[in-house]
Image: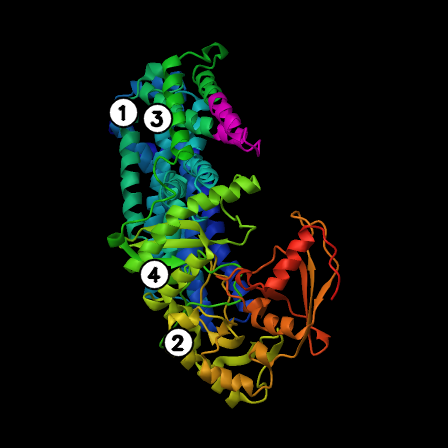
Amino acid sequence: MKSKIYSSRYMKISSKGMIWIPAFVTIGFLLAFPVTELIMLGNWFGMEYTAEQISLLYENLWRNGFMVSGLAVAALAALFNGISQFWYLYSPRKIDFYHSLPVKRSRMFWYKSLQSLLYFLLPYLVMEFFSVCIGAMRGFFSLHLMRMAFVMLVFHLLLYLLLYFSVVLVICITGHLLMGALLLVAAAAYGPVFSVLLDLYERAFYYTRSESSYCLVKVLKELISPVALAYTFVKKYAEGNYGGMLIAVLLVTAVLGGLGYCAFVHRKSERTGMAFVFPWAGTAVKFLVVVSGGLGIGFVFYMLSNDSSRTIWWIFGLILGTILSGGIMEIIYYRDFRKFFSHKLQFAVNGVCVALVACVFFFDLTGYDEYIPSYDKIENIAIGSADNSWEIAYNVKVNEDGTVTMLDSGDSVGNDLGVDQNIYEIMKKLAKESKAAYKEILQDSHSMWSSNLWDPSGNTLGIKVRYNLKSGSVVYRKYMVGLDDIKNLWKEGMTEGTLKSEYYSILELDDKYVDEVKCDFITGQSISLFQDNKAKKQLLVDALRQDIKEADSEVLTGEPCAGLSIGYSGVPFVESVNAMGTGQTGNYYFSPCFYVFPQFKRTVEILKETGYPISMDDVDLSSVEVQYYMDEYHNEVSSPIVYDQPEQLKELKKVLRCYQLVPFWEKREEESWDSLKVVIGGVESEASWAILEKDVPEFMKEDSQRALSFEVLEEE
């Protein structure tokens, strides 16, 4: 009897009733592989790409594009195969029939799994073979591509088993259709959704939280879901860094397969129709759902208010959310509204857990805001550029073949400071003081988010920080930092770290790529220099490069007298392509902007030859017109006050700065006046002007105070 039941012949007979599954999978892989390949090849040849470019795109299609499209089909195949093979577990009559057969459950489980595997594997092999043939017909065939095709087959098979055993496990531990469907959705979405919820809590309660997610939130988002884990593996494979993820996928697949097997073998038939065949599984799922539901509904109430009552509403939402989530889960479990409060002890335990998680965020019990990795664990510290900086730098590497590779990490934290004891001590100070600064700004702004905040007083700036650890982990933070601290940090990075070499690395490009050099002079005029004199243009770039090389950190954090923008065009770059192989090809255009400091003797000497002023001493300042604010809310302004006396103009020459030549670590005075107009040589300057807060002349301070006192300011 056993030889006939679940034998190869039986599998052929039983397959007749489920022929739609391999047919569906075949259509899916037909669209995912051959059809996609023909469309992409047609597009590439139609765009007249070179043979080398198409070869690169075609290789990426096998590495990335087919992996993504194949994963989508594999996920659907795993869902349909798992449901079709084990659907009978929700029917008491079918269970009685199948379990009355003289076949062990273990044998039954593996035969069904093998049959499902064949429904996936055979269509896959056929369609992949067609794809290889199509590529060979167009001239794309090599042992390297064959190896990629084989690797893709193995990885898609592994991901299929991961998703298949997830579906089987869900069916084997649930007792009826509704709970099975809900648990399937939860298994696929719980990790990513809960990661979003925790991310929102971090943004609301952690003041130094950066926009980049990592640690627990990243793990929940990328790993705590079979679907998310499979997609993360595909991304890592495309990047060529999938060793660790491969081990994780293998382990999770083995665990899910083992759990599914045990659940199927030890499943009690008499519990069919109940929510969960194994009561402990129902308790665990209920706990996860109620805790996340309580936190989620609590956060909704937290967002309803922007005043001091927000915390009260939040606590009310946490309590209400816990009760509703727990009650609804009981109703679903028992399909009876009278069971809303059937497990009061579980309500209490779940409520305590919700309160504990809420307290972790509200009181920062983990020390998140002031946390900084220990000195001996840090490999490098990097910071992001301030948003109000005129300078634009590119961190690049010039390869031996002349191509350029961008070294920026893509997380807006691309300025490497390195790490030494001085930099580490400054970062500890910033981490400690930043929380207090954020609290003050949040209180004034009545905002619930610490990210994207700006300080209206101008005393602090938000900077992103990245700690690269020796273990390979990364820690992100965002600090609200005082301007003096930013300057000290920048100076230390220039002195001890790698900041200087990386910040100015774009200047190492060959001079043949220099297209245009533009200078922003101290008067605000932006002039293209030496357009018809290539030799002079190159001499200026060489002079800037040499001056920067010889300058120390004191010079590079001083007061600039001009700014140079260098346009590099036609710079070859390492080609990158996206998931479906439609990446752009061509050349980079760079336009870095760097300050010129008075100590740059070579650069300043060449700029003086243009006839434009490098120092305010050489500027014919005619007058300065100011309109002061007459109230602290900036609703009223005074009549224009014109300063044109020789003593006043002499003092103003010392403090006036063109707006774009003010470094980001300097504070401009913008609270006292509404407008600041500068007249040079009898003509009003079109540039924006500023005076640093520390440099405001006494006569302007006095007039500002008189305006606030509503005294009549008469033009002198």
Q: Is residue 71 above or below residue 308?
A: below
Image quadrant holding the N terminus, namely top left
Q: CA distance from mark 3 to mark 1?
A: 9 Å
Hey, which residue is sitting farthest top in the picture? 338
Residue matched to label 4: 146
- Does the magenta-highlighted stretch encompass residue 308? yes
Disc 3 or 1, which lies upstream in sequence? 3
Mark carried by residue 265? 1
Disc 2 or 4, which lies upstream in sequence? 4
Image quadrant holding the C terminus, namely bottom right
Q: Amino acid at mark 1?
A: Val
| Callouts 1 and 2 close, C-beta under 8 Å | no
Residue matched to label 2: 551
Residue, x 32% and y 66% (percent of image)?
Answer: 496
Mark toward the viewer: 2 or 4: 2
Mark toward the viewer: 1 or 2: 2
Q: Is residue 439 above or below residue 388?
A: above
Q: Is residue 595 above or below residue 150?
A: below
Residue, x 47% and y 68% (percent of image)?
Answer: 393
Q: CA distance from mark 2 to mark 4?
A: 54 Å
